[in-house]
Amino acid sequence: MSSIKAKRRKKAGAGQYILSTILLLYTIFCAMPILLVFIGAVTDEKTLATEGFSYFPSKFSLDGVSSVLKYGKQLFVSYGVTIFVTVAGTALGLFVMSMLAYSLSRRDFRMRSFLSIYIMIPMLFSGGQLSSYIIYTSTYHLKDNLLLLILPLCVSTMNIIILRTYVQSSIPEELIDSARIDGAGEYRTFFQIVFPLMKPAMAAVGFMMATAFWNDWQNALLFITSDNKKPLQLLLVNIQKSIETLLSNKNIPTAVLAKMQGMVPQNSATMATVIVVIGPIMIAYPFFQKYFIKGLTVGSVKG
């Protein structure tokens, strides 16, 4: 009997080693493009033009990084705007959607069916970007306002469904009923009992929202005109457009333009831009990974 158990342990151990090796190789395979981005950011532009992107470039240069960092104060201001919009938008969105999700999870809520259908409509139909622009600028008069970087991405139907499913599947109804028996109202039940228990789902949804806010640049391009309100992504898009405009200027002689092709760090600056954008997300993701996977699993399997 003991020999059979020992054989099973050996087989299980061998299987774990094989699975770990496969996962390690897959991780390396996924990390290689990210590594190439970092190497491309510090590779000389002429080397990129002649040799292409390589893990072992023949010459390194910080011109691409310098072209991004030379914006100095504006880069710092744009970072501050993006951080503010990400934090404020994520916090506000989680606060509103968690309350709505709790309401939709209650079977005795009279408007449950109506609101469930109501929040599904924007998920299936959209008025388009032109109508949104007219409403935000002409009706709400929010042109060049940071609220336009927060409100459009604040509430999402899919995130509400994930939070509602988590409340229904992970928070016992007996717990809520016992709070009501003790005299707690709906607000006290939500804020003191339900809200603290929603942390895993809110961490998962919050990370997705923070990523969406951090990477958003289209709303800023449409609505933001002041330099002190430009988010990081819009600034970096403008940097790339400036380089492209310089290299495609027809007023510059052909000989000079050909010489500039290897001097202006277009490709390396692009890679440096990517690093500036994804750096904070890469740092934050490991801290949210546990809750992110748990919250998504609940929302997708039991929905």
Image (cartoon, rainbow, N blue to C red):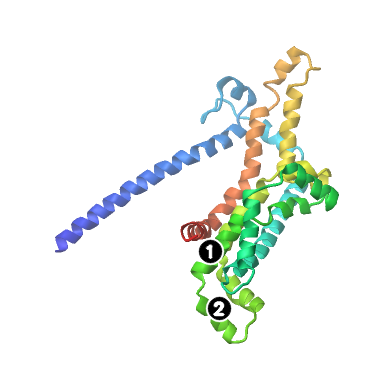
Q: Measured along the vertical axis of the image, is residue 5 above or below residue 138?
A: below
Q: Position of residue 66 (x, y in %)?
A: 70, 35
Q: Measured along the vertical axis of the image, is residue 58 above or below residue 110?
A: above
The mark that comes first in sequence, 1 or 2, is: 1
Q: Position of residue 169 (x, y in %)?
A: 49, 67
Q: What residue lies at 57% left-to-right and 86% top-to-bottom? A: 181
Q: Is residue 80 visible?
A: no
- Residue 176, labelled with which disc? 2
Q: Position of residue 4 (x, y in %)?
A: 16, 59
| Camera-nearest residue between 201 and 158 | 158
Circle 2 packing at 10 Å, graded few (<14), some (14-19), many (20+), is some
| Camera-nearest residue between 203 and 72 | 203
Q: Is residue 10 visible?
A: yes
Q: What residue lies at 78% left-to-right and 45% top-to-bottom? A: 133
- The secondary element bearing badge 1 is classed as helix
Name the residue tied to disc 1: 165
